[in-house]
Amino acid sequence: MNMMNCCFPCFKKHEKVNNGDLNNVPAAHQPGDDMLLFTPQHTGHTAPEIVTVEEKESTLAKSGIEAKQYTFRELATATKHFRNECLLSESGFGRIYRGTLQPNGQVVFVKRLDKNSTQGNKEFLVEVLMLSLLRHTNLLKLVGYCADGDQKLLVYDYMPMGSVEEHLLDLKAEMQPLDWVQRMKIACGTAQGIEYLHEKANPPIIYRDLKCSNIMLDDEFNPKLSDYGLAKLGGNNKSHVTIMGSYGYCAPEYEKHGELTLKSDVYSFGVILLELISGRRAMDTSKQADEQNLVSWVNLIILTLLCFYLSELIRWDRHTLLFVMIMTIVHIYGF
């Protein structure tokens, strides 16, 4: 079965399902397995509709599931007061630290969110608890949180293998490159995680910042998506559009016009596929100008090959071939 057809709602036909009948839910998504909470309700291509805080609180009250609440002191102690030696990475949402919880010694990721949020503690807590209800084998598990004044932190399961970026693009001398089986395993697992966020979460979640550094790996190279749903935790002013993605991964309509849909994540997934196949970064300024953007470089290769085979098969003259090249470029870039 075509992976794109099975893993992305944007590219498949939808069948009517009786949400009240659990017998109609595929075995892989039975409650108690990798999906505990949500039933698919959103099948369109546009951004999910807004759900009020009161509706979310009602869902939480019925679920009976809560993430563990930590004090700021506990998490500061776990990360040695957020020293640089515990700092693992930074993203558009904040910094990620390696922490060791006391007294049990559990190792975790601690995400310290930026302080520029306009979101109140009540809204933050509701959003975090909603995220804690998400359960899927390809999502990094949210195990706890802290909301202490302007200090907002999230606690996740620790993945000792690090991110896909470390094994694909920042390979150290002592590390083995990913083989093709591992690369395809990462691609399939990532697609399934995105499908869950788009199809099973209610309301659906658009990732916005899907990239290799946000895909963690367990000991068997199973991918775990991190930073999902964090765009809402920023609490930005809704009167203007804030682009949350990373350059090279953003869909053109989102980067240029702020038009965010489920397909924005599908575009980012396509870029990750190209990275897995080529071993090149989505954006690499160390390369010559026409090779810096991975998508543009691949389009150029496809265009060159297309023109070569057309010239060989049809034996067109140069003027006709030039016309075909121009029309192909217009088609690809939408001029």
Image (tube, rainbow, N blue to C red):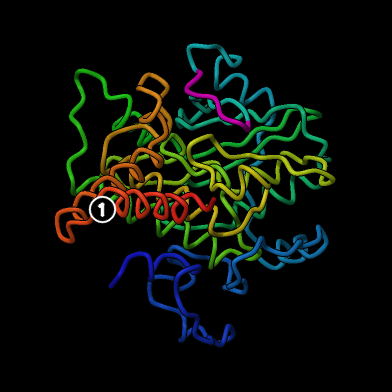
Q: Quadrant of residue 53?
A: bottom right
Q: Is residue 101 above or below residue 305?
A: above
Give the SS element for disc 1: helix
| Extreme residue toward the top, this view | 84
Q: Quadrant of residue 71?
A: top right
How packed mark 1 is, by other alpha carbons closer than 10 Å (few <14, some 14-19, many 20 or more), is some
Q: Percent x, y for residue 94?
A: 62, 28
The residue at the point 35 percent across, 30 percent down is 291
Of residues 6 and 115, the one nearer the viewer is: 6
Q: Amino acid at mark 1?
A: Leu
Q: Percent x, y for residue 189?
A: 35, 54
Q: Is residue 301 above or below residue 306?
A: above
Q: Can you identify the residue that label 1 sits on? A: 306
Q: Percent x, y for residue 85?
A: 48, 12
Look at the magenta stretch and give its main secondary structure.
strand
Q: Relative to 47, is 199 on the left or the right?
A: left
| Extreme residue toward the left, this view | 312
Of residues 1 and 87, the one nearer the viewer is: 1
Instruction: Determine if the magenta segment contains residue 238.
Output: no
What range of the chain is rendered magenta? 87-93
